[in-house]
Structure formats: structure tokens, C-alpha cells
Amino acid sequence: MESYLPVTNAKAERRSKSKTVQNTSKSSLLMGFLSCLAWLYVAGRLWQDAQNRTLLAGLLKKNSGQRPRVLTMEDKLSVLGCKGLERRIADAEMELTLAKSQGFLKNQLQQSGASSGKKLLAVIGVYTGFGGRLRRNIIRGSWMSRSDVLKNLEERGIVVRFVIGRSPNRGDSLDRGIAEENRANEDILILDHHEEAQEEMPKKVKFFFSAAVQMWDADFYIKVDDNVDLNFDGLTELLRSHRDKESAYIGCMKSGDVVVEEGKTWYEPEWWKFGDQKSYFRHAAGSIFVLSKNLAQYVHINSASLKAYAHDDVSVGSWMMGVNTTYIDESRLCCSYSGQGMYVCGVTAYDLSHIGHARVYVAFDVLYRYLKHLGYEVNYVRNFTDVDDKIIARANELGEDPISLSRRFCEEFHHDMAYLNFLPPSVEPRVSDHIPQIIAMIRQYGRLSGRKLEDNRAGQRVAVDSRKRNTADFALWKAAKEGEPFWESPWGPGRPGWHIECSAMSAAYLGCSFDIHGGGMDLVFPHHENEIAQSCAACRESNVSYWIHNGFVTIDSEKMSKSLGNFFTIRKVLELYHPLALRHFLLGTHYRYPINYSELLLETASDRVYYNLSALHDSESITAQHDEASLKDSIPAEVATSINKFQDECSISMTDDLHTSVALSAISEPLKTMNDLLHTQKVLYIVESLAALEKTVRDILAVLGLLPDSYSEALKQLKDYALRRAKLTEDHVVHKIEERNAARKNKEYEKSDAIRKELASAGIALMDSPEGTTWRPALPLALQDQ
């Protein structure tokens, strides 16, 4: 028994070991088999990927010579080997088409122009936003000025719509306002799935092309910013010339070269460079670009997968990578990319400026402000003439260097402009700094004024030079005289003539062709006429789109000027009147008409400024007591109507040759509504209404340059000016109020009335209220009778 047990245990142990080895061998074989399968699977996938890439390359090559040029969904499904899915999609599309044709399904979007069976040439989407009502009215006034214009355009094969999304707060007053505006004008495409918020703006271009290609059947689809001036005839001709191009992407096309200087045209961020760090993908400027129908359909079909970047032009350019696109660089679409140019002839700086100068530069300051308000990038150039016969004569009189004298008065001019709340121009070139740019130009008369030679009178501005062969000749370069500044030139030492300076400096900063050239009416002839002659001789393409000239400030129907000695300097007027009052006075008459300087008109302007700012200040005092976040997004219908009416009147008047006087008059209505609300106790949404009205009036005052930094500070200053004109002090007025209160208490009403009349004669109006008696500036009684 004892000897048996060890034997039995040994056999069992051997059997156990043998079994373990067998199990290990089976596991190794199984693992080896699975490894082979994995290797074969990976190899198969790599081979399949290689085949897919080969097939994709072949399809791209094939697309270069066959239609469709765009890589379609069928091609992509074919590449992926999804034949069954491709068939199911095709069957579903056929069933959907059949259902629609039989009336079981209604098209979500109806096609304009489809009823006529005529295919459209183009669909133009003009980008706009909730704050763009004024700009939309500008566009309607310029190329939608008649009710039948849109219809006529559609008959020519062009559909134009403003493009806007929904408010982040769906159904609020912003959405309702756009819906109401669209009902009235029928010219807005509302992107229902796009939110008009800053962070969502990059996606807007996808939603536009997707919606447009569903709504209209056209050859081309165009995205346009609302600050682009469209020439429909030129655009139609351009599109028809490219109608035979497939997969066309048209615009002011980037060359592909790297621009590394920030601020330069076509500058791109570092992360858009290709691997060689020297080139980018091609894309058009974002202001206006065109996609042909199949590219727009490509955007619509693939909108879910196309990535949107910060700028439309970058996004669309990236979408065209890998797609066989025909890039068309159209220089006619490049003008919209650059800013607009305005050149205004500046002062001849040899003395303090008078209010005739203020009239000129107030007009162009408002034009500059309004163009910027509309979103234009304006390059505003206003020069200084610091080399001139008058400057030399004044310098000799004072025993001062002419250039130094002129620079001193240039600085004084800057102070005057700052007092009057002027925006500084983009650049202020001086003649003495631009001698190298001043070149010879040839005479050419008659293009601007239509003036006859026999009507010219010599010696009206400067004495006739005895060296002239004809008194009507003008000098491009004047030979040096003893004691005068001079520069070397091919014609000997000398200095520029008067007219040549503006031709040279405008070309230096704005090019040979620009938008606006302005100045006083007295510059039409000979200054601007001679500018045309010189500029056209130097550059065949020289052109100014709009010449703008303001009327004179007159005294007793005679032009105010230093040479006549009947002028008031800006400084002199500002001793007695607030700068905003002077500015209001100058804007109260259309800029092209003469305005007669008078104490009555200045007093009236001052009184009006005080009234406007008082209403705004009282409104601001109420709204400041409430947190802006707590205000409801709703105002009564009558207040909304008042705001819309005011905005429309201002838009129409300002776009109709800058009728500032009409805009100033229109302010009365919203201010009246504000004062009514301020004196009403139980009105729904009174704070919201006051806030909306105050912002609306403030916006137009900012455009007119009549908005102070602080309402309360400006009101205090206006009262100080009134006291100065009345030759009174604040203490004196307070004493008179106390004296009058005592007379009223003692029922001495005759004495009380006499005190009121005494102050009113001096331009001080007393205001009685339950809280007591206060005073405000007013028209003096003597002027009220005029």
C-alpha cells in the first residue's frame, strides 16, 4: 500500500504535464492564426485605401474634361463603395420627386420667376443686419427708387434681395420689425435657420447660397455687402460674358502670393499658408463674389460638412479646394474692395479762420460722418496751402518766415476745428511737403463750369503777372523772386502755382480717379477748372465722380471774406455762442445755398440746441435709474411708428444731397414724444420707450456732429454763454428770481411780471413749477419780434 501510492502519483504528474503542453500548443496556434487574420485585415484596408485614393485621383482628373465639374455625392459614395446606399438614396429621391409632382408634398420654397418658365441670370443677395435699416433705405433710394424696379430687374433675369437671419430671441421686436419691413417692400430674404449673432455670422454665407439655390433657378448666385455700389448694366454684361463657364468662381481674385504686412490688401494670417509657406489657396475678396449654379448647389448639398471660418472669402475659397473650379479674376469687381476717396480743398493758412471756412468744413465733416455711418471706408484728404502769394505778403508784413507763419496758423485752424467737433481727416498734406509730387500738367478749360473765355476777369484773386502771354493763363511753376521760398526744379528755382498743388496731392493719396472733390463755390472757377486741365493732361484716366461745392456765408447779401474785410472769425463768434450752436446754425440751411449771418439765426440755433439736449438729458436721467438688462424688449406701437418715421425721414433727407436742415426739423417729432412720455405717469413700457427714442435721436445727432460728450455739461455751458451775452451773472439771475418770488407772495403781480420781462429781454426765460422757479436760455424779446 505504501509502495503503490508513489507510483500512481508519478503517472498522474506526467499525464498532467503532457496535458498542459498540449493546451499551450493549441493557444499558440490560435494566437498565430488570429495574428495572421489581423495582418491580412490591415493589409486589405491599406490596399482598399490605396485603391480609393487612386479612384479619387482618377475622378478628379476625369472631372477636368467632363460634366459635372463638381465632385458629386454619387462620386463620393462610389469612392466609399456604398453602392447599396447610393441605390437607396436614388430610389428615395425618385419617390420624393414623384410625390411632389402629384401634389402630395408642397415645396417648402417657391421659385421666383418659375411661373414664366424663364431661367434667371443671377440672384443677388445683399448682406444686411438688424441695425441696417438706414442703409437699406439708401440702397432702395439709389437702385430701387421706384416700386417697379425689382419687377423690371426680374424681367431682365435678376433677382435682388436683402439677406438677414433671425434674432437670437426668436419672435422679438427685431424679427417683427424685419417682417413688417418685408411686407411693405417685399425685398428681404429671411434665413430662417441662421441666427443673426456675431458668433454665427461666418455661417451666413452657407445659409444664403443654400436658400438661394433652392428658391431660384439661376445661372449665377452673388453675395454682395451693402456698402457696394452695384452697376446692374455692367454686372449683367459681365455675367453674360461668363455664362458658358462651368463651375465659375468670379471675383477680385487673390493671386496666391503671400502678403505678410498686416493692414495691406490681401494680408492673410499665418495659419492659411500651404506647406511651402509661400502660397495660399485662391479666393475672391469678400465684398462681392459670384458662384455659378453647380458650385452653389455643391455648397447646398455639402453645407453640413463645409467648415465656416471668420471671413466669407476665406470660407468659400477653402470649399473650392479639391473641386474642379474655374477661377475668374474680374478687375471690375475689385473696386468694391478698396475704400472711397474724398478730397477737400483746405485753407490758405495766413490768418485765423472765419465762419465762411467753418461753413465749408462743417458740410464735408457731416458728409464724412454720414458715409462712415453707412459703413463706407472713406479716405478723407484735406490739404493745407502753406506756399502762396497771400502767405508771403502776410509774412513780409509781420517780418516772419512764410513757412513758419503758415504752420502756426495751421495749428490755430486745428484748434478751431476741434472746438466745432470736427472729425480729423485721414490725412492733411501740405504743399511744402509735396514739392517732389508736383509735376507739370497741361491746360484744359471748360469741363466743369462751362464758362466762356470772354467772361473771365483777370486779377480777381492775385495781381496779373506781366510775364503772362494771356491774362487767362495760369502758372504751373512760378520762378523764384527775392525773399520768397523756393525749390529747385527742371525749370529753375521757384515754387508751385496755386492750382497744381491739389492735382498733385489728390493723385498722391487717392489716385488719378476718385469719388468726391469738394470746396467752396468760389473754387469752381478757376481753381477746380484748372485742376481738371492739369490732371487730365497728366493722366488720361483722371476722373472725379462727384464735384461738391458749398454756398457762401453772406453779410447783407455779400460774400464774407478776408479780402473784403466783412468777416467774423470762428474765435470771435465762439466768445458768445456755444460751438454746437454755431454748428447747428451752419447746418440749418442746405449746404449749396448761401446762408446770411445774423444774430437772430445764431440765437435761434442756440435755443434749439438747448431744447434738444434738455429733452435728451431728462430722458437719460430716467433710464439711468433702471438696469438695461431688466428692460423689456417691447415698446408701444405708436412709439415704434414714431421712431421708424423719423429714421425714414432722416435717411431720405440725408441721401437726397445731404439735406441737413430737413433732418434737423425731423428731430422735433421724437423729442415731442419724449417730452409727452416724461410728463405721463401711467404708460406701459415708458422707460423702454424713452431709451429707444433717446438712442434714435442720439444716433442722428452724432452723424450731424451735434452730440456732446455730456448732456449736463453742454447744458451748463449753454447757460454760461447766455449769461455772457446778457452781460449777467448767475447770482444776479438767482437774486432776481428771489425778488420775483417775494413779489408774487405779496401779490405784487405787476412787479413780478416786470422782473420776468426784464430777464426775458436779456434772453433769460423763467420756468415755474411745483418744485420752484428755474431759468433757461431763450430768444431775447427784441429778436422774437423780428
Image: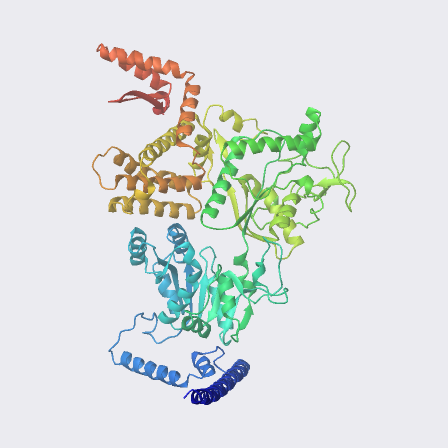
> Number of labelled discs?
0
Q: Nearer the viewer, residue 40 or 648?
A: 40
Quarter occupied by residue 73: bottom left
Closer-to-camera residue (356/314): 314
Of residues 35 and 218, the one drawn nearer to the viewer in this rendering: 35
- Please report the residue visible at 24 percent of the width from the left and 78 percent of the height from the top: 104
In the rendered image, residue 411, in percent from the top left (x then y), is placed at 60, 32
Q: Is residue 642 visible?
A: yes
Q: Is residue 160 above or below residue 245?
A: above
At 52% from the left and 25% from the top, the residue drawn is: 572
Residue 251 in percent (x, y) is at: 52, 65
Q: Quadrant of the C terminus?
A: top left
In this rendering, is residue 158 above or below 72?
above
Position of 64 with respect to 155 (left or right) is right
Q: Is residue 567 visible?
A: no
Give the image quarter of residue 462. top right
Task: From the viewer's perspective, tell me whether residue 83 is left or right of residue 561.
Answer: left
Which residue corresponds to the image point at 50% horizontal and 41% vertical from the top-left? 365
